[in-house]
Amino acid sequence: MSDALRVLPLPPDVVTDLARLGDTRTWEAGAMVVSEGEVADCMYLIHEGELRTFIAGEGGRSVELNTMGAGEIFGELMLSGDKRSASVQALTRVRLTRVMQGEVERLVALRPDLAFHLIERLAQRVRVLTATVRGLASVDVYGRLVGLFDALALESGGTRFVPGPLSQQRIAERLGASKAMVNRLLRDLADGGYIELGRERIVLLKKLPPRW
């Protein structure tokens, strides 16, 4: 995700106060931290690692909504007493603190500024999700693929590349497309000499065409 579409981290003092109230543990890459439809009774602080948020789509497909990193929180909608609206999965080994709803509510009573920070994060998350949905609705799959590559691309030694591993399934979920469509586009781009597909990265050999 580009920096413009990432929810800003909480102030360090807020993270410290919340962390004192919960229990901290690690999850390995691939582990499901929360699942869509579960009862929302706690929130999580991210100390290390990266996670992704996704929802179940039609036909068994998943749609990735955003990624999260150190300093961010998730699960704050538990304050509404509702169920989880999305699933969260660890992309790398992560260290998280789980804080139960009652503890958060007690801290909010002692630190009213915490309520402001939580509302601010919710507003940022709505902006991120709005941008994601707008992209899915207004741009075709190829255009979304180009946008994803632009957001993730790095440059080293004169070579521009998208770091991985980034599976076709994961790309499909981030684009809201089928794996078959992603496979076709990547192979067409590789055959056209635009990209080089590797296990650990996708090398961008030349500027991608505006349309495909």
Image (tube, rainbow, N blue to C red):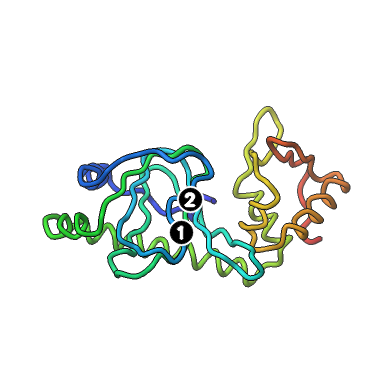
Query: In x, y percent, where is residue 90?
Result: 49, 45
Rounded to the nearest whole Å, what is the CA distance between mark 2 and mark 1?
7 Å
Q: In this view, does 63 lie above or below 154?
A: below
Query: In x, y percent, where is residue 121?
Result: 34, 59
| Disc 1 target residue | 35
Question: Looking at numbered disc 2 in the image, what kind of residue is underneath it?
Answer: Met
Q: Nearer the viewer, residue 186 or 83?
A: 83
Residue closest to the far top: 157
Q: In this view, does 175 lie above or below 156?
A: below
Q: Which of 9 and 80 is in front in this view?
A: 80
Residue in view at x 36 percent, y 63 percent: 122
Tags 2 and 1 touching, CB below 8 Å: yes
Query: In x, y percent, where is residue 119?
Result: 29, 63
Q: In which quarter of the image is residue 103?
A: bottom left
Q: In which quarter of the image is residue 142?
A: bottom right
Residue in view at x 76 percent, y 47 percent: 207
Query: In x, y percent, where is residue 171?
Result: 66, 53
Residue closest to the far right: 191
Question: Looking at numbered disc 1 in the image, what kind of residue is underneath it?
Answer: Ser
Residue in view at x 56 percent, y 65 percent: 56
Residue closest to the far front: 38
Look at the image and tell me in which quarter the C terminus lies: bottom right
Residue in view at x 74 percent, y 42 percent: 204
Q: Residue 140 carries which label?
A: none
Q: Is residue 111 above or below residue 157?
A: below
| Disc 2 target residue | 32
Q: Classify mark 2: helix, strand or loop.
A: strand
Q: Is residue 202 left or right of residue 83?
A: right
Number of residues whose C-alpha sits closer than 10 Å to that of mark 1, classed few (under 14), some (14–19) or many (20 or more):
some
Q: Is residue 206 left or right of residue 132?
A: right
